[in-house]
Every structure is written in structure tokens, then in C-alpha cells.
Image (tube, coloured by chain):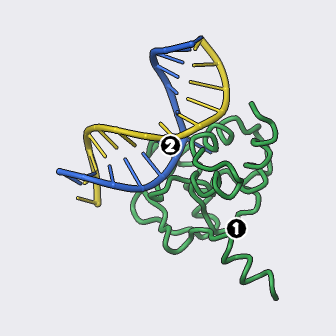
Chain colours: A green, B blue, C yellow
DNA sequence: GTCTTGACTAAGC
DNA sequence: GGCTTAGCCAAGA
């Protein structure tokens, strides 16, 4: 495992604000990892328990979660998101409303 | 060295 | 809206 890449993934995920979400591909690109979306999934899967990385804010490009619906992990992730005010439309998060846009975020917060 | 497996994605039907 | 297919790329076996 490339420790440096793993750390970059953590950094990016930690930068996702409460109540917002990003796709695996988004995190990969933002971390400078190109198209390695699946690698992001691997990193999150290996995350130690009790980590401060908000892994639940990372989901698939279509807004569905990375787990089979109804599984324990799926329920846990959904509960965490709902607790943050993230709205669901069936089995998917409303990406249009909650998708994290790092560049926009920088524009809105950076120059204030 | 190859083959399989993923918390993936975009495109096509 | 859904399902399938083909591409993707790092890890492990």
C-alpha cells in the first residue's frame, strides 16, 4: 500500500464539510490520484475503527452507497448521513443538493 | 509473471 | 427510470 496516497485520500475526505457528500471518483481526482476511484474504496475499507475520517460522506457517482442496501454497513452509513441532514431519494442521496464542490467551496469561503 | 477481485464510472440499450 | 458492458487500476493470491 502506498502510504502517501492513502494519506492523501484521508486528507481529502476529512475536508468534506458536514452535510455534504462526494463520490469516490471526486475524492480520487481531488487527491491527485486520477481515475483511481476504486483505490479510494479500498482505502476507506481499510480505515481503522475510531478514525476521524468521515468515510460516510463518500459514495458512488450515482448517489447510491457503496454497500448492498439493507446491510449493516449500509444502514450505518445512511443513519450517519441522515443525522447530518443529507436527504435521500429512495436508495440514493440527492447529489444535486449535497454534492461537495471543492472549487466552489474555495471560491465561496476563500475570499471572504 | 498472470489472474481475480473490488465501498468504481461512463456509455449504451 | 432500470440493467448490462466495457474500461479502469491497485492489491493479493
Label located before the other in sequence (1 or 2): 1
Secondary structure, mark 1, is loop
Query: Counting other residues with Cα less than 10 Å from the Cα at mark 2, is it few (<14), some (14-19), or many (20 or more)?
Result: some
Front one among B5 and A36: A36
Relative vertical location of residue A58 with respect to residue C3 in this rendering, above or below: below
Secondary structure, mark 2, is loop
Relative vertical location of residue A74 with respect to residue A89 in this rendering, above or below: above
Residue B3 at x, y percent in the picture: 45, 15
Q: At 76% from the left edge and 37% from the top edge, which residue is drawn?
A: A48
Q: At 41% from the left edge and 66% from the top edge, which residue is drawn?
A: A89
Query: Counting other residues with Cα less than 10 Å from the Cα at mark 1, is it few (<14), some (14-19), or many (20 or more)?
Result: some
Same subunit: marks 1 and 2: yes
- The numbered mark at residue A67 is 2
Q: Which residue is mark 1?
A: A18
Numbered disc 2: what chain?
Answer: A
Front one among A97 and C4: C4
Rounded to the nearest whole Å, what is the CA distance between mark 1 and mark 2?
21 Å
Residue A60 at x, y percent in the picture: 51, 52
Amino acid at each position: 500500500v502506498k502510504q502517501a496516497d492513502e494519506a492523501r485520500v484521508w486528507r481529502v475526505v476529512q475536508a468534506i464539510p458536514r452535510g455534504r457528500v462526494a463520490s469516490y471518483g471526486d475524492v480520487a481526482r481531488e487527491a491527485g490520484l486520477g481515475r483511481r476511484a476504486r483505490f479510494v474504496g479500498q482505502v476507506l475499507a481499510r480505515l481503522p475503527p475510531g478514525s476521524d475520517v468521515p468515510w460516510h460522506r463518500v459514495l458512488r457517482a450515482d448517489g447510491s452507497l457503496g454497500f448492498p442496501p439493507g446491510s449493516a454497513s449500509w444502514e450505518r452509513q445512511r443513519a450517519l448521513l441522515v443525522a447530518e441532514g443529507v436527504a435521500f431519494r429512495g436508495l440514493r442521496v440527492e447529489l444535486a443538493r449535497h454534492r461537495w464542490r471543492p472549487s466552489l467551496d474555495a471560491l465561496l469561503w476563500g475570499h471572504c
